[in-house]
Image (cartoon, rainbow, N blue to C red):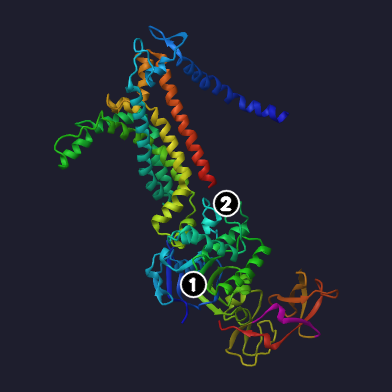
């Protein structure tokens, strides 16, 4: 009895905080997404399902018009996030392997380098990319000077720029779980595999990859989720062509002042992320048990 | 012709302090087709390096390794027709017992059905019939040991390498596994090269024991020869308990104990006597018991000779009138048992 009181006392601050500042706003968003948009912003307290109708295709066609562009932007965001996960994985996996094999001091230094970007503001770093990618920027200047290209590449304000930016931001989040999984990999297992006649490719696909799968799934989840809803990267580097669902939500709340519609978009993003998370945790669990 | 032939193996490591350490310093070893050979020595003697050089996970700076006449050093580890039982077992945790055991066949492209029969056979040989569907996490330490063994013999290698495979087991299980391993080796009719730092393990199982020290082989021989006729002081001290005496041409120690040495090999030399070679007698070396260690059937006595010098270790049968601490005793010995060391 005393113990459970003690436990409750310990858990109370976190529960209270999350309840008020996390679940509360979430509940407001969920309710707003089903209310009528007010004429000058805000909401009117009557049930209204056409916020979702505008996105999925049952709008009345008079006040609210169905626009496939919203779904397209959502799908594009999912695609960008998936591509970001894939690229981060391809970049980080070999590097994590290499770092895990370094002597302890060099390893620590590399881990420090990976976390270095967190020491300065994301906005500042993205504007640095702006300077690098723009037609007269560092990248184009270098390529022009070496004669590899004759006219500046149009990278800035394209989808490539958005994916590049997302990968840049997310690489550390992929690296750390991967590194931890690879560092924990028992080297004698790799030797056992080769000892039993498996060549390097077989050893990788049959032993190394399955053994590090929890790290891959963990990294994929924590890269995918913030990428889907990211709006800073497309805002700075994307322009109109690189618009993502996060920008859409931001616009609806701040510029269009259509809170219920923005709330509906946000709820859909959350639903997709939640589904991804449940799927990934099921996969991770089966990987751990197999 | 021998199955495995190691010649002039040399391997030098860089120590963290910048020094150079010869893990293998000119090792020659022949292993017969159905022989159980144990590499025995303290940690850092090079026994594991030698094993890893044979399996392919360690390169040699100099020397050759041939298996049935084929040059092993030219083959990648996964092409060498030898298999290893690892110290940590290194079982694949994401696979079932059966898939672990069948791994060597799987990567050779053998079909599932053909594999199944061989896996069942291997599991039966190690006494794990019917456990194929288990996950590795559900097994006890002893069972894991057996899975590692089954996995290593499923591809029917001519030579099995074992890297201190019993060190993680408790004493009873270890003794049982020692006998089983020896029986398995005889039944399979293949060669075992077994690495251990446990001299009892080496004496129990081996056809021949290779005692190593600082990257060199000190002595190779059958267990009895290693125990009864150690060539060097190191071997005499490493294998079992022993009493060493520095003798002059008259068979006298510096303190004045006298031993009968018919043909002294030099003006100064070392002789050894095992504790069990002494017996309590009416006359002989006079001394006082300083310590008694009870071992069950036997007692281990430490006897300080009256003339001085190091304490003698003596094994005596335990009985009601056995000496106690402080008792004055006389020690006799069989003159034949006194063994002269070469170095």
Residue A212 is one of the magenta-drawn residues: no
Q: Earlier in the sequence, mark 1 or mark 2?
A: 2
* Residues beneath discs 1 and 2 located on the same chain: yes
For image coordinates 46% across by 47% down, the residue present is: A212
Q: Position of residue A239 (x, y in %)?
A: 27, 25
Residue A148 located left or right of residue B240: left
Q: Is residue B238 visible?
A: no
Relative vertical location of residue A7 with respect to residue A146 in this rendering, above or below: above
Q: Which mark is residue B53?
A: none
Residue A150 x %, y % = 14, 38
Q: Which residue is mark 1?
A: B158
Residue ID for mark 2 = B135
Label 2 CA crowd tier, 10 Å (few <14, some 14–19, many 20+): some
Q: Residue lying at the far front in this picture: please name it.
A: B113
Identify the magenta region.
B272-282
- Image quadrant assignment for residue A119: top left
């Amino acid at each position: 009895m005393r113990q459970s009181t003690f436990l409750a006392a310990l858990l109370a601050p976190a529960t209270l905080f999350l309840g008020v500042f996390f679940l509360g706003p979430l509940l407001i968003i969920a309710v707003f997404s089903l209310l009528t948009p007010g004429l000058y912003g805000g909401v009117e307290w009557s049930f209204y399902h056409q916020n979702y109708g505008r996105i999925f295709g049952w709008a009345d066609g008079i006040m609210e018009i169905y626009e496939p562009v919203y779904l397209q932007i959502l799908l594009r965001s999912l695609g960008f996030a998936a591509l970001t996960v894939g690229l981060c994985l391809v970049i980080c996996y070999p590097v994590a392997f290499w770092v895990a094999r370094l002597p302890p001091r060099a390893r620590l230094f590399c881990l420090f380098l990976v976390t270095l970007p967190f020491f300065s503001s994301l906005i500042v770093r993205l504007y640095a990319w702006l300077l690098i990618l723009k037609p007269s920027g560092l990248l184009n200047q270098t390529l022009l000077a070496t004669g590899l290209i004759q006219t500046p590449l149009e990278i800035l304000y394209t989808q490539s720029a958005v994916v590049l930016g997302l990968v840049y931001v997310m690489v550390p989040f992929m690296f750390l779980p991967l590194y931890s999984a690879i560092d924990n990999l028992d080297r004698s297992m790799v030797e056992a595999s080769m000892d039993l006649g498996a060549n390097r490719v077989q050893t990788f696909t049959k032993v190394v990859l399955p053994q590090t799968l929890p790290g891959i799934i963990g990294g994929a989840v924590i890269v995918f989720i913030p990428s889907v809803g990211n709006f800073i990267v497309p805002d700075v580097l994307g322009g109109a062509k690189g618009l993502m669902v996060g920008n859409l939500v931001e616009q609806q709340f701040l510029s269009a002042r259509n809170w219920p519609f923005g709330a509906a978009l946000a709820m859909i993003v959350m639903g997709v992320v939640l589904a991804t998370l449940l799927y990934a945790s099921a996969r991770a669990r089966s990987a751990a048990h197999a | 012709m021998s199955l495995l032939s190691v010649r002039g193996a040399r391997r030098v490591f860089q120590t963290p302090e910048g020094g150079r350490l010869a893990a293998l310093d000119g090792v020659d070893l022949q292993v017969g087709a159905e022989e159980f050979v144990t590499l025995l020595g303290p940690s850092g003697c090079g026994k594991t390096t030698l094993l890893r050089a044979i399996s392919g996970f360690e390169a040699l700076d100099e020397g050759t390794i041939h298996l049935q006449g084929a040059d092993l050093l030219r083959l990648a580890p996964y092409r060498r027709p030898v298999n290893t039982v690892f110290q940590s077992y290194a079982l694949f945790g994401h696979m079932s017992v059966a898939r672990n055991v069948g791994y060597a066949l799987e990567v050779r492209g053998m079909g599932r059905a053909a594999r199944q029969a061989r896996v069942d056979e291997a599991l039966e040989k190690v006494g794990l019939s019917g456990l194929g569907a288990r996950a590795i996490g559900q097994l006890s330490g002893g069972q894991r040991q057996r899975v590692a063994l089954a996995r290593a013999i499923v591809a029917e290698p001519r030579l099995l390498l074992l890297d201190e495979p019993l060190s993680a087991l408790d004493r009873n299980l270890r003794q049982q596994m020692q006998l089983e391993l020896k029986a398995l080796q005889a039944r399979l009719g293949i060669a075992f090269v077994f690495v251990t730092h446990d001299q009892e393990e080496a004496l129990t199982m081996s056809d021949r024991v290779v005692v190593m020290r600082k990257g060199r082989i000190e002595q190779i021989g059958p267990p009895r020869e290693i125990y009864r006729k150690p060539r060097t002081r190191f071997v005499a001290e490493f294998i079992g308990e022993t009493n060493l005496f520095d003798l002059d041409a008259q068979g006298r120690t510096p303190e004045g104990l006298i031993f009968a040495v018919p043909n002294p090999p030099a003006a100064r030399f070392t002789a050894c006597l095992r504790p069990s070679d002494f017996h309590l007698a009416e006359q002989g070396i006079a001394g006082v018991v300083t310590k008694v260690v009870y071992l069950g059937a036997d007692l281990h006595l430490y006897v300080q000779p009256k003339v001085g010098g190091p304490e003698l270790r003596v094994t005596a049968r335990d009985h009601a009138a056995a000496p106690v601490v402080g008792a004055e005793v006389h020690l006799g010995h069989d003159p034949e048992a006194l063994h002269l060391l070469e170095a």
